[in-house]
Protein backbone atom coordinates (compact mmCIF):
# COMPACT_ATOMS: atom_id res chain seq x y z
CA UNK A 1 0.00 0.00 0.00
CA UNK A 2 2.74 2.39 0.98
CA UNK A 3 4.63 1.40 -2.15
CA UNK A 4 1.61 2.25 -4.34
CA UNK A 5 1.25 5.66 -2.67
CA UNK A 6 4.93 6.30 -3.14
CA UNK A 7 4.73 5.44 -6.87
CA UNK A 8 1.71 7.72 -7.30
CA UNK A 9 3.61 10.59 -5.69
CA UNK A 10 6.65 9.96 -7.91
CA UNK A 11 4.50 9.84 -11.05
CA UNK A 12 2.58 12.95 -10.00
CA UNK A 13 5.79 14.83 -9.28
CA UNK A 14 7.22 13.86 -12.64
CA UNK A 15 4.01 14.86 -14.43
CA UNK A 16 3.98 18.17 -12.56
CA UNK A 17 7.63 18.72 -13.43
CA UNK A 18 6.94 17.86 -17.06
CA UNK A 19 3.96 20.22 -17.20
CA UNK A 20 5.98 22.96 -15.54
CA UNK A 21 8.82 22.44 -18.01
CA UNK A 22 6.41 22.59 -20.96
CA UNK A 23 4.82 25.72 -19.53
CA UNK A 24 8.26 27.34 -19.15
CA UNK A 25 9.21 26.42 -22.72
CA UNK A 26 5.93 27.84 -24.04
CA UNK A 27 6.45 31.01 -21.99
CA UNK A 28 10.02 31.40 -23.24
CA UNK A 29 8.94 30.76 -26.84
CA UNK A 30 6.06 33.18 -26.46
CA UNK A 31 8.37 35.78 -24.91
CA UNK A 32 10.95 35.38 -27.66
CA UNK A 33 8.29 35.45 -30.40
CA UNK A 34 6.66 38.50 -28.89
CA UNK A 35 9.98 40.33 -28.69
CA UNK A 36 10.86 39.39 -32.25
CA UNK A 37 7.48 40.62 -33.46
CA UNK A 38 7.80 43.86 -31.50
CA UNK A 39 11.29 44.41 -32.94
CA UNK A 40 9.82 44.06 -36.43
CA UNK A 41 7.01 46.42 -35.39
CA UNK A 42 9.59 49.00 -34.28
CA UNK A 43 11.39 48.82 -37.65
CA UNK A 44 8.21 49.18 -39.72
CA UNK A 45 7.03 51.92 -37.34
CA UNK A 46 10.22 53.89 -38.00
CA UNK A 47 9.78 53.22 -41.73
CA UNK A 48 6.24 54.67 -41.53
CA UNK A 49 7.51 57.80 -39.79
CA UNK A 50 10.18 58.24 -42.48
CA UNK A 51 7.57 57.82 -45.22
CA UNK A 52 5.45 60.52 -43.56
CA UNK A 53 8.49 62.82 -43.37
CA UNK A 54 9.18 62.39 -47.10
CA UNK A 55 6.56 65.03 -47.87
CA UNK A 56 8.25 67.57 -45.58
CA UNK A 57 11.90 67.02 -46.47
CA UNK A 58 13.07 68.14 -49.91
CA UNK A 59 14.71 65.72 -52.29
CA UNK A 60 17.97 67.67 -52.19
CA UNK A 61 18.06 67.24 -48.41
CA UNK A 62 17.50 63.48 -48.55
CA UNK A 63 16.59 61.32 -51.53
CA UNK A 64 16.65 58.23 -49.29
CA UNK A 65 13.61 59.38 -47.32
CA UNK A 66 11.72 59.76 -50.61
CA UNK A 67 12.11 56.00 -51.15
CA UNK A 68 10.12 55.36 -47.96
CA UNK A 69 7.38 57.67 -49.25
CA UNK A 70 7.17 55.52 -52.38
CA UNK A 71 5.97 52.52 -50.36
CA UNK A 72 3.82 54.32 -47.76
CA UNK A 73 0.62 52.26 -48.33
CA UNK A 74 2.48 48.97 -47.87
CA UNK A 75 4.22 50.15 -44.70
CA UNK A 76 0.93 51.52 -43.37
CA UNK A 77 -0.85 48.17 -43.81
CA UNK A 78 2.00 46.32 -42.05
CA UNK A 79 1.64 48.70 -39.08
CA UNK A 80 -2.11 48.15 -39.19
CA UNK A 81 -1.47 44.39 -39.00
CA UNK A 82 0.57 44.84 -35.82
CA UNK A 83 -2.15 47.06 -34.34
CA UNK A 84 -4.72 44.29 -34.88
CA UNK A 85 -2.28 41.66 -33.59
CA UNK A 86 -1.64 43.47 -30.29
CA UNK A 87 -5.39 44.09 -29.87
CA UNK A 88 -6.18 40.39 -30.34
CA UNK A 89 -3.43 39.32 -27.94
CA UNK A 90 -4.49 42.03 -25.44
CA UNK A 91 -0.95 43.33 -25.28
CA UNK A 92 0.07 46.72 -23.92
CA UNK A 93 2.30 46.97 -27.00
CA UNK A 94 -0.83 48.08 -28.88
CA UNK A 95 -0.02 51.68 -27.92
CA UNK A 96 3.12 51.70 -30.09
CA UNK A 97 1.41 51.27 -33.51
CA UNK A 98 -1.44 53.53 -32.36
CA UNK A 99 1.00 56.37 -31.63
CA UNK A 100 2.92 55.79 -34.88
CA UNK A 101 -0.26 55.79 -37.00
CA UNK A 102 -1.67 58.88 -35.25
CA UNK A 103 1.55 60.83 -35.91
CA UNK A 104 1.03 60.33 -39.64
CA UNK A 105 -2.76 60.74 -39.61
CA UNK A 106 -2.62 63.46 -42.29
CA UNK A 107 -1.01 61.13 -44.79
CA UNK A 108 -3.79 58.60 -44.39
CA UNK A 109 -6.40 60.88 -45.97
CA UNK A 110 -4.12 61.65 -48.93
CA UNK A 111 -3.79 57.93 -49.66
CA UNK A 112 -7.19 56.51 -48.65
CA UNK A 113 -10.59 58.10 -49.08
CA UNK A 114 -14.26 57.37 -48.43
CA UNK A 115 -16.74 59.43 -50.44
CA UNK A 116 -20.52 59.31 -50.13
CA UNK A 117 -21.41 61.86 -52.83
CA UNK A 118 -19.41 61.28 -56.01
CA UNK A 119 -20.80 62.57 -59.28
CA UNK A 120 -20.18 60.41 -62.37
CA UNK A 121 -22.29 62.21 -64.99
CA UNK A 122 -21.23 65.67 -66.09
CA UNK A 123 -23.68 68.58 -66.20
CA UNK A 124 -23.52 71.03 -69.15
CA UNK A 125 -21.80 73.78 -67.14
CA UNK A 126 -19.18 71.40 -65.70
CA UNK A 127 -15.80 70.30 -67.03
CA UNK A 128 -14.76 66.66 -67.38
CA UNK A 129 -11.00 66.09 -67.48
CA UNK A 130 -9.35 62.74 -68.19
CA UNK A 131 -5.66 61.82 -67.95
CA UNK A 132 -4.00 58.60 -69.08
CA UNK A 133 -0.43 57.38 -69.50
CA UNK A 134 -0.95 55.11 -72.53
CA UNK A 135 2.54 53.50 -72.39
CA UNK A 136 3.21 54.17 -76.10
CA UNK A 137 0.19 51.95 -76.85
CA UNK A 138 2.47 49.06 -75.91
CA UNK A 139 4.49 49.57 -79.08
CA UNK A 140 7.32 47.38 -77.75
CA UNK A 141 5.19 44.23 -78.04
CA UNK A 142 4.33 44.04 -81.74
CA UNK A 143 2.66 46.01 -84.50
CA UNK A 144 -0.64 44.13 -84.30
CA UNK A 145 -0.85 44.60 -80.53
CA UNK A 146 0.04 48.29 -80.97
CA UNK A 147 -2.82 48.97 -83.42
CA UNK A 148 -5.32 46.95 -81.41
CA UNK A 149 -4.38 48.63 -78.12
CA UNK A 150 -4.46 52.10 -79.67
CA UNK A 151 -7.92 51.55 -81.16
CA UNK A 152 -9.26 50.17 -77.87
CA UNK A 153 -7.90 53.15 -75.93
CA UNK A 154 -9.35 55.64 -78.41
CA UNK A 155 -12.74 53.87 -78.19
CA UNK A 156 -12.56 54.12 -74.39
CA UNK A 157 -11.78 57.84 -74.57
CA UNK A 158 -14.65 58.47 -76.97
CA UNK A 159 -17.11 56.63 -74.72
CA UNK A 160 -16.15 58.75 -71.69
CA UNK A 161 -17.00 62.00 -73.53
CA UNK A 162 -14.40 64.16 -71.75
CA UNK A 163 -13.99 67.86 -72.45
CA UNK A 164 -10.23 67.71 -71.94
CA UNK A 165 -7.93 64.72 -72.43
CA UNK A 166 -4.29 64.65 -71.34
CA UNK A 167 -2.19 61.74 -72.58
CA UNK A 168 1.35 60.84 -71.61
CA UNK A 169 3.61 58.57 -73.64
CA UNK A 170 1.50 59.13 -76.75
CA UNK A 171 3.26 57.30 -79.59
CA UNK A 172 3.05 57.59 -83.36
CA UNK A 173 5.04 55.60 -85.89
CA UNK A 174 3.28 56.48 -89.13
CA UNK A 175 4.94 58.52 -91.87
CA UNK A 176 2.31 61.19 -91.31
CA UNK A 177 3.11 61.93 -87.69
CA UNK A 178 0.25 64.29 -87.02
CA UNK A 179 -2.57 62.69 -88.99
CA UNK A 180 -3.33 60.13 -86.21
CA UNK A 181 -3.60 63.05 -83.76
CA UNK A 182 -6.10 64.78 -86.05
CA UNK A 183 -8.07 61.55 -86.34
CA UNK A 184 -8.25 61.19 -82.55
CA UNK A 185 -9.21 64.86 -82.21
CA UNK A 186 -12.10 64.33 -84.60
CA UNK A 187 -13.16 61.09 -82.86
CA UNK A 188 -13.28 62.92 -79.54
CA UNK A 189 -15.25 65.77 -81.08
CA UNK A 190 -12.49 68.03 -79.79
CA UNK A 191 -11.82 71.52 -81.08
CA UNK A 192 -8.02 71.41 -80.88
CA UNK A 193 -5.03 69.31 -79.92
CA UNK A 194 -1.54 70.29 -78.83
CA UNK A 195 1.32 67.79 -79.01
CA UNK A 196 4.99 67.99 -78.07
CA UNK A 197 7.51 65.17 -78.31
CA UNK A 198 9.71 64.27 -75.35
CA UNK A 199 12.70 64.20 -77.67
CA UNK A 200 13.40 64.74 -81.37
CA UNK A 201 12.10 62.30 -83.96
CA UNK A 202 13.86 58.94 -83.99
CA UNK A 203 13.46 56.19 -86.59
CA UNK A 204 10.23 57.75 -87.89
CA UNK A 205 8.70 57.61 -84.43
CA UNK A 206 7.49 60.13 -81.90
CA UNK A 207 6.56 59.83 -78.24
CA UNK A 208 5.35 62.65 -76.06
CA UNK A 209 2.54 64.61 -74.42
CA UNK A 210 -0.76 65.67 -75.96
CA UNK A 211 -3.80 67.68 -74.83
CA UNK A 212 -7.13 67.37 -76.63
CA UNK A 213 -9.68 70.08 -75.84
CA UNK A 214 -13.26 70.88 -76.81
CA UNK A 215 -12.62 74.47 -75.79
CA UNK A 216 -11.03 77.28 -77.75
CA UNK A 217 -7.27 77.52 -77.20
CA UNK A 218 -5.73 81.00 -77.00
CA UNK A 219 -2.18 80.09 -75.95
CA UNK A 220 0.10 77.07 -75.59
CA UNK A 221 3.64 76.18 -74.56
CA UNK A 222 5.99 73.53 -73.22
CA UNK A 223 8.29 73.20 -70.22
CA UNK A 224 11.83 72.05 -70.86
CA UNK A 225 15.33 72.99 -69.75
CA UNK A 226 18.88 71.81 -70.41
CA UNK A 227 19.36 68.34 -68.99
CA UNK A 228 15.67 67.48 -69.15
CA UNK A 229 13.33 66.27 -71.87
CA UNK A 230 10.03 68.05 -72.41
CA UNK A 231 8.20 67.19 -69.19
CA UNK A 232 5.11 69.37 -69.47
CA UNK A 233 2.91 71.15 -71.96
CA UNK A 234 0.10 73.62 -71.33
CA UNK A 235 -2.82 75.19 -73.16
CA UNK A 236 -4.87 78.21 -72.16
CA UNK A 237 -8.53 77.55 -72.96
CA UNK A 238 -11.67 79.68 -72.74
CA UNK A 239 -14.34 78.12 -70.51
CA UNK A 240 -17.52 80.10 -69.80
CA UNK A 241 -15.75 83.34 -70.75
CA UNK A 242 -12.86 82.64 -68.36
CA UNK A 243 -9.33 81.53 -69.21
CA UNK A 244 -8.16 78.29 -67.62
CA UNK A 245 -4.64 76.90 -68.01
CA UNK A 246 -4.37 73.14 -68.53
CA UNK A 247 -1.04 71.52 -67.63
CA UNK A 248 -0.19 68.02 -68.82
CA UNK A 249 2.92 66.80 -67.01
CA UNK A 250 5.10 63.71 -66.99
CA UNK A 251 7.88 63.97 -64.43
CA UNK A 252 11.11 61.98 -64.55
CA UNK A 253 10.72 58.23 -64.30
CA UNK A 254 12.93 55.95 -62.22
CA UNK A 255 13.31 53.71 -65.29
CA UNK A 256 13.58 50.46 -63.40
CA UNK A 257 14.07 47.45 -65.65
CA UNK A 258 11.74 44.44 -65.25
CA UNK A 259 14.53 42.52 -63.51
CA UNK A 260 14.97 45.43 -61.05
CA UNK A 261 11.29 45.29 -60.13
CA UNK A 262 11.46 41.50 -59.77
CA UNK A 263 14.39 41.94 -57.38
CA UNK A 264 12.52 44.54 -55.30
CA UNK A 265 9.47 42.29 -55.01
CA UNK A 266 11.41 39.07 -54.39
CA UNK A 267 15.18 39.41 -53.82
CA UNK A 268 16.92 36.39 -55.29
CA UNK A 269 20.63 36.35 -54.58
CA UNK A 270 22.93 33.77 -53.09
CA UNK A 271 25.01 36.09 -50.92
CA UNK A 272 24.77 39.36 -49.08
CA UNK A 273 27.31 41.05 -51.33
CA UNK A 274 25.20 40.36 -54.44
CA UNK A 275 22.10 41.71 -52.70
CA UNK A 276 24.01 44.79 -51.54
CA UNK A 277 25.39 45.50 -55.02
CA UNK A 278 22.00 45.16 -56.68
CA UNK A 279 20.32 47.30 -54.01
CA UNK A 280 22.96 50.01 -54.51
CA UNK A 281 22.39 50.02 -58.28
CA UNK A 282 18.64 50.40 -57.84
CA UNK A 283 19.09 53.17 -55.25
CA UNK A 284 21.35 55.12 -57.64
CA UNK A 285 18.60 54.96 -60.28
CA UNK A 286 16.11 56.24 -57.70
CA UNK A 287 18.43 59.05 -56.57
CA UNK A 288 19.09 60.24 -60.14
CA UNK A 289 15.38 60.26 -60.96
CA UNK A 290 14.54 62.15 -57.75
CA UNK A 291 17.24 64.74 -58.43
CA UNK A 292 15.93 65.46 -61.93
CA UNK A 293 12.33 65.39 -60.71
CA UNK A 294 13.08 68.07 -58.13
CA UNK A 295 14.51 70.35 -60.84
CA UNK A 296 11.42 69.77 -62.97
CA UNK A 297 9.22 70.46 -59.95
CA UNK A 298 10.95 73.78 -59.21
CA UNK A 299 10.59 74.84 -62.84
CA UNK A 300 6.90 73.85 -62.86
CA UNK A 301 6.12 75.65 -59.59
CA UNK A 302 7.62 78.85 -60.97
CA UNK A 303 5.32 78.53 -63.99
CA UNK A 304 2.32 77.95 -61.70
CA UNK A 305 3.18 81.01 -59.60
CA UNK A 306 3.46 83.13 -62.76
CA UNK A 307 0.05 81.96 -64.03
CA UNK A 308 -2.79 84.39 -63.35
CA UNK A 309 -5.55 82.02 -64.51
CA UNK A 310 -7.26 79.12 -62.81
CA UNK A 311 -5.28 75.90 -63.27
CA UNK A 312 -6.06 72.26 -63.96
CA UNK A 313 -2.93 70.15 -63.71
CA UNK A 314 -2.98 66.53 -64.90
CA UNK A 315 -0.49 63.79 -65.47
CA UNK A 316 1.96 61.19 -64.33
CA UNK A 317 4.00 62.46 -61.37
CA UNK A 318 5.90 59.17 -60.97
CA UNK A 319 5.54 59.84 -57.26
CA UNK A 320 3.10 59.07 -54.45
CA UNK A 321 0.91 61.28 -52.21
CA UNK A 322 3.57 60.95 -49.48
CA UNK A 323 6.24 62.58 -51.65
CA UNK A 324 7.86 66.00 -51.69
CA UNK A 325 6.58 66.53 -55.26
CA UNK A 326 2.96 65.96 -54.24
CA UNK A 327 3.32 68.06 -51.10
CA UNK A 328 4.61 71.10 -53.01
CA UNK A 329 2.04 70.91 -55.82
CA UNK A 330 -0.92 70.52 -53.45
CA UNK A 331 0.16 73.66 -51.61
CA UNK A 332 -1.34 75.58 -54.52
CA UNK A 333 -3.82 73.08 -55.96
CA UNK A 334 -6.44 70.62 -54.70
CA UNK A 335 -6.22 66.88 -55.34
CA UNK A 336 -9.51 65.80 -56.92
CA UNK A 337 -9.06 62.29 -55.49
CA UNK A 338 -8.89 63.69 -51.94
CA UNK A 339 -12.05 65.67 -52.65
CA UNK A 340 -14.14 62.90 -54.25
CA UNK A 341 -12.08 59.71 -54.51
CA UNK A 342 -12.82 56.30 -53.03
CA UNK A 343 -10.51 53.71 -51.47
CA UNK A 344 -6.89 53.75 -52.57
CA UNK A 345 -7.47 54.24 -56.32
CA UNK A 346 -3.94 53.18 -57.22
CA UNK A 347 -3.10 54.20 -60.78
CA UNK A 348 0.00 52.13 -61.47
CA UNK A 349 -1.00 48.84 -63.08
CA UNK A 350 2.47 47.28 -62.96
CA UNK A 351 3.89 44.74 -60.50
CA UNK A 352 4.51 47.21 -57.64
CA UNK A 353 1.22 47.37 -55.67
CA UNK A 354 -0.90 50.25 -54.36
CA UNK A 355 0.93 53.09 -56.13
CA UNK A 356 -1.11 56.20 -56.90
CA UNK A 357 1.16 58.22 -59.18
CA UNK A 358 -1.32 59.84 -61.63
CA UNK A 359 -3.27 62.91 -60.58
CA UNK A 360 -5.72 65.61 -61.53
CA UNK A 361 -5.21 68.76 -59.45
CA UNK A 362 -7.50 71.78 -59.62
CA UNK A 363 -7.08 75.42 -58.65
CA UNK A 364 -8.82 76.95 -55.65
CA UNK A 365 -11.41 78.59 -57.91
CA UNK A 366 -12.62 75.20 -59.09
CA UNK A 367 -14.81 72.80 -57.14
CA UNK A 368 -14.49 69.02 -57.53
CA UNK A 369 -17.79 67.24 -58.14
CA UNK A 370 -16.58 63.76 -59.07
CA UNK A 371 -13.56 61.50 -59.43
CA UNK A 372 -13.26 58.13 -61.21
CA UNK A 373 -10.52 55.58 -61.71
CA UNK A 374 -11.22 53.21 -64.59
CA UNK A 375 -10.48 49.48 -64.46
CA UNK A 376 -9.14 49.33 -67.99
CA UNK A 377 -5.78 47.63 -68.27
CA UNK A 378 -4.43 48.63 -71.66
CA UNK A 379 -1.29 50.18 -70.21
CA UNK A 380 0.87 50.02 -67.09
CA UNK A 381 -1.32 52.85 -65.76
CA UNK A 382 -5.04 53.19 -65.07
CA UNK A 383 -6.84 56.24 -66.49
CA UNK A 384 -8.56 58.67 -64.13
CA UNK A 385 -11.04 61.49 -64.65
CA UNK A 386 -12.49 64.34 -62.63
CA UNK A 387 -15.56 66.52 -62.97
CA UNK A 388 -15.00 70.09 -61.82
CA UNK A 389 -16.94 73.31 -62.00
CA UNK A 390 -16.04 76.96 -61.69
CA UNK A 391 -16.91 78.62 -58.40
CA UNK A 392 -19.03 81.68 -59.04
Image: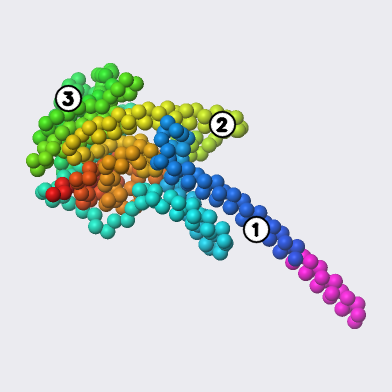
Q: In this view, does 389 lie above or below 243?
A: below
Q: Can see residue 380?
A: no
Crowd around label 1: few <14 · some 14–19 · many ≥20 (10 Å): few
Residue labelled with disc 1: 30
In this picture, residue 3 sits left or right of residue 162: right
Q: Distance between the residues labelled 2 and 1?
A: 33 Å
Magenta segment: 1-19
Name the quadrant containing residue 8. Answer: bottom right
Q: Distance between the residues labelled 1 and 3?
A: 68 Å
Crowd around label 2: few <14 · some 14–19 · many ≥20 (10 Å): few
Q: Do the residues labelled 1 and 3 touch (CB within 8 Å)?
A: no
- The residue under the point 48% across, 31% down is 283
Residue labelled with disc 2: 276
Residue labelled with disc 3: 178
- The residue under the point 10% across, 35% down is 216
Residue lying farthest right?
2
In this picture, residue 119 sits left or right of residue 60: left
SS assignment for the magenta stretch, majority: helix
Instruction: Say which label, 2 or 1, has the lower sequence index.
Output: 1
Residue 9 covered by magenta stretch: yes
Residue closer to the observer: 21 or 145 = 21
Residue closer to the observer: 104 or 174 = 104
Q: How far apart are marks 2 and 3 (CA)?
A: 47 Å
Instruction: Say which label, 2 or 3, has the lower sequence index.
Output: 3
Residue closer to the observer: 226 or 265 = 226
Expressed as whole percent of the image width and height from the top left, the position of residue 103 reads 45, 51
Q: Is residue 123 above or below residue 381?
A: below
Expressed as whole percent of the image width and height from the top left, the position of residue 46 reads 52, 46
Amino acid sequence: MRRKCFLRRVIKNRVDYYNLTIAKIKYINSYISKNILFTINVFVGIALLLSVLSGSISISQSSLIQVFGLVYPIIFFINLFFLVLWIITKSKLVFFPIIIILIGIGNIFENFQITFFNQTDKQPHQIKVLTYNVQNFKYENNTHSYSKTKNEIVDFLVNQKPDIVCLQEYHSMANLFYQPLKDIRDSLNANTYYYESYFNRKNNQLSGLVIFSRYKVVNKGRLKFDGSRTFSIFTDVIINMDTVRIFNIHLASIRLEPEDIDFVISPDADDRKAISNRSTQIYHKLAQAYELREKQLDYLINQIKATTYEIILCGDFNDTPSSWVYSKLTDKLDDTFVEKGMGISHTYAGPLPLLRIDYILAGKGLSTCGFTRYEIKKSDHYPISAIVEQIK
